[in-house]
Image (cartoon, grey):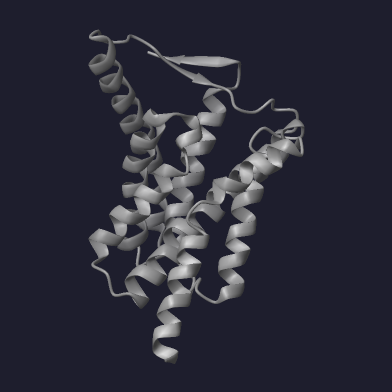
């Protein structure tokens, strides 16, 4: 009985943390966006990370990472941006039948306090990695013994669905980057540091590119 209860509770935890963005609407209603545009998003991920932590299904978190993987993780962040741009160009061509010449990076923060923005970006990226990499892989791979490549796909899919409020095209883009985050997480011996570096670096690069209202990438 305890064996079955263990699996059931793990499944319930997995379901409960699968959609952190469901809290964003509540936080937006509280007008927290006046402080920082993505603060509601970050707060929801913090809360769900805490839920996972206190349930005990977060597993053993590995922070150790070699210089090689740290450097590789940073470089891969540029690859993620490039792939998202390519996807956007292809999707635009399929829909409108002509190639776009410019990609615009719109700012998503007011940049009233850059230091605070960086903390929010880092916290959000790290908590997303805790949920969609650390917890998902611990439950699906270590507890349910699901094939690692299937876990990679599931993790990336759930991660991408949580970005649907950016539009359906963002779901495809985030599925691609979700696959990459998962791969770097797996091949770095499940170090949360590696995928967090890639995730944070990608978000920071976009933050820098949007230093004005919009910056054009030619």
Instruction: Point out residue 135 in the picture as x, y percentages from the top left corner.
Output: 46, 65
Residue drawn at x 34%, y 42% is 175
The answer to whether residue 62 is visible is: no
Vertical relation: 192 (above or below) 143: above
The answer to whether residue 44 is visible is: yes
Residue drawn at x 53%, y 48% is 125
Residue drawn at x 37%, y 55% is 155
**Extreme residue toward the front, this view:** 1
Instruction: Point out residue 41 in the picture as x, y percentages from the top left corner.
Output: 61, 43
In the image, 211 versus 138, the foreground residue is 138
Figure quadrant of the C terminus? top left
Residue 207 in which image quadrant: top right
User: Is 87 displayed left or right of 54 in the figure?
Assistant: left
Instruction: Point out residue 37 in the picture as x, y percentages from the top left corner.
Output: 67, 32
Residue 38 in which image quadrant: top right
Vertical relation: 133 (above or below) 94: below
Figure quadrant of the N terminus? bottom left
User: Is 88 displayed left or right of 161 in the figure?
Assistant: left
User: Is 101 displayed left or right of 111 in the figure?
Assistant: left
In the image, 26 versus 37, the foreground residue is 26
Residue drawn at x 32%, y 48% is 180
Vertical relation: 213 (above or below) 164: above
Instruction: Point out residue 50 in the picture as x, y percentages from the top left corner.
Output: 62, 64
In the image, 191 versus 30, the foreground residue is 30
Count of numbered circles on the image? 0
In the image, 143 versus 121, the foreground residue is 143
């Amino acid at each position: 009985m305890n064996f079955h209860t263990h699996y059931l509770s793990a499944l319930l935890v997995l379901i409960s943390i699968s959609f952190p963005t469901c809290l964003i609407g509540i936080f937006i209603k509280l007008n927290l966006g006046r402080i920082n545009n993505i603060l509601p998003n970050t707060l929801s991920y913090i809360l769900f990370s805490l839920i996972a932590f206190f349930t005990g299904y977060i597993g053993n978190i590995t922070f150790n990472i070699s210089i090689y993987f740290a450097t590789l993780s940073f470089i891969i962040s540029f690859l993620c941006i490039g792939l998202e741009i390519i996807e956007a160009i292809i999707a635009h061509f399929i829909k409108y039948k002509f190639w776009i010449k410019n990609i615009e990076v719109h700012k998503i923060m007011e940049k009233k306090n850059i230091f605070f923005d960086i903390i929010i970006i880092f916290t959000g990226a790290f908590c997303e990695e805790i949920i969609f990499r650390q917890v998902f892989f611990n439950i699906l791979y270590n507890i349910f013994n699901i094939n690692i490549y299937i876990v990679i796909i599931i993790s990336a899919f759930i991660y991408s669905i949580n970005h649907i409020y950016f539009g359906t095209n963002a779901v495809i883009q985030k599925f691609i980057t979700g696959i990459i985050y998962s791969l770097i997480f797996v091949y770095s011996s499940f170090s949360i540091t590696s995928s967090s570096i890639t995730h944070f670096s990608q978000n920071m690069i976009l933050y820098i590119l949007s230093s004005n209202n919009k910056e054009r990438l030619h």
